Amino acid sequence: MQVNSEPTTRESPGGPTPSTPPASRGPAEARAAVGHQLSAGDAEKAAALRKMKLVALGLLLVMAVIFVFAFALQKEYPWLQYVRAAAEGGMVGALADWFAVTALFKYPMGIKIPHTAIIPRRKDQIGASLGEFVETNFLSEQVVQDKLASVNIARRAGEWLATPAGSERVAKEGAAVIRGLFKVLNDDDVQAVIEGMVRKHLLTPPWGPPVGKMAERIFRDGHHHNLVDLLVDRAADWVDDNHATVTHLVSDRSPTWVPQFVDGLVGDKVYVEILKFVRAVQADPNHQVRQSIDKYLNDLAQDLQHDPAMIARAEDIKAQVLGDPEVRELASRTWGTVKNALLGAVDDPDSELTVKFKAAVRDFGSRLVSEPELAGKVNAWIGDAAAYLVRTYRSDIAGVITDTVARWDAEETSQKIELQVGKDLQFIRINGTVVGALAGLAIFTVAHLVFG
């Protein structure tokens, strides 16, 4: 940004001349003249505008000089009458077009002539008309949808996403969004939300009925049989490897008056019977013990659903396992784990998450290119979304133009518009000078031929 330190100029027929300094102006004019900042582009346009004004002024001065010399010498050189008439017409055309151009942006020579300074006086109406024009002709659902349909955004986006550069850019921007989100989020607030969700969806509802219902389905389908087989196999292996332990238990519990060899015989017998029993349970899938286990588990599932005493016991267990400290610790660990995992993944370009995300983006882009049906659906979604935005917010969008122009100072508005179109308008002055000269020459020639 640069500050335009040059004094604001007021254009006269003789070209731009310095206007009254800010100290002698009103507050609004002083604000517009002092500290008005121009961007690099506007400064370039201002320089081009000044150059074109000088060209138009120079052409007017050339016509004036030619007129003076032609007027002074036309008696000696009668053919200079034609030159004088052309220069006279050129001056008239230049002055008339200067007045017309200047009247758009300011009062010519500071004189408040009616219907001049049109833009400063009617800037609010111009802003409202411009907003209405944009809303009517550009912010139309049909216009937006037709434009989007002709562009085929889905295919173009797919071609870009399918490239390594496209997927890399999406991953980079997504990582930036995630990092920014984690910076904005407060850890205590997030943990409080997680804790509230755990309490609402995990602790408040009773555990017994849903656990019993799920267990009933598992037991009915026989999914627990693999676990029972595992327990029976481990029991058989334990008995097979612990002969001494079994016989020692028998001898320890026998009366002291029983001879030791009898204890050994009884212990061996007990061990053999236990091993035979376990092997029988292991070998027979319909063994009575297995059926008893099935019955016990099914009864437990029913009690968890319908027995108030069992439901109460389940709630007591839940309260013991997940009290307030445990819930808070669970929420803290959950959030900390998720946060650290995501931050670590997005910061590492070679992490599994980043690599898979890029691959998914490229795959989606390739599908948008190779599958017209998918691309058509995406285009339809984009068109519907754009139509909804236009339909809902068209007045608000157009209102930005109206409100922005309404907030501008009248002189500032005039300067902004003059910077955009003033250079082209100076060609009107140049053309007016040329056309005026030709018209003056033609009129004088016709009159001379007719009247002599």
Image (cartoon, rainbow, N blue to C red):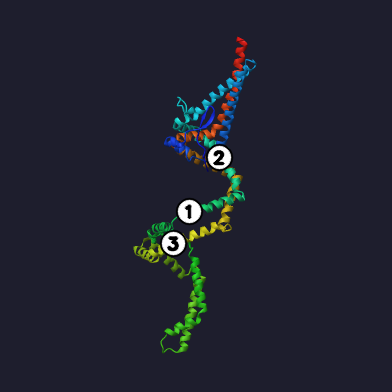
Residue identifier under label 1: 181
Asked if residue 48 shows in the view, the reply is yes
Q: In this rendering, would 299 be left or right of 75?
A: left
Asked if residue 394 shows in the view, the reply is no
Q: Residue 99: horizontal and vertical position, in percent? A: 51, 25
Measure the C-alpha gap from mark 2 to mark 3: 53 Å
Residue identifier under label 3: 332
Measure the C-alpha gap from mark 1 to mark 2: 35 Å
Q: Nearer the viewer, mark 2 or mark 3?
A: 2
Q: Nearer the viewer, residue 138 or 220?
A: 138
Element at label 3: helix
Q: Residue at x 62, y 11 (%)?
A: 449
Element at label 1: helix
Residue type at tag 3: Ser
Q: Quadrant of the C terminus?
A: top right
Q: Which mark is residue 41?
A: 2
- Residues at discs 3 and 1 in contact (Cβ within 8 Å): no
Residue type at tag 2: Gly
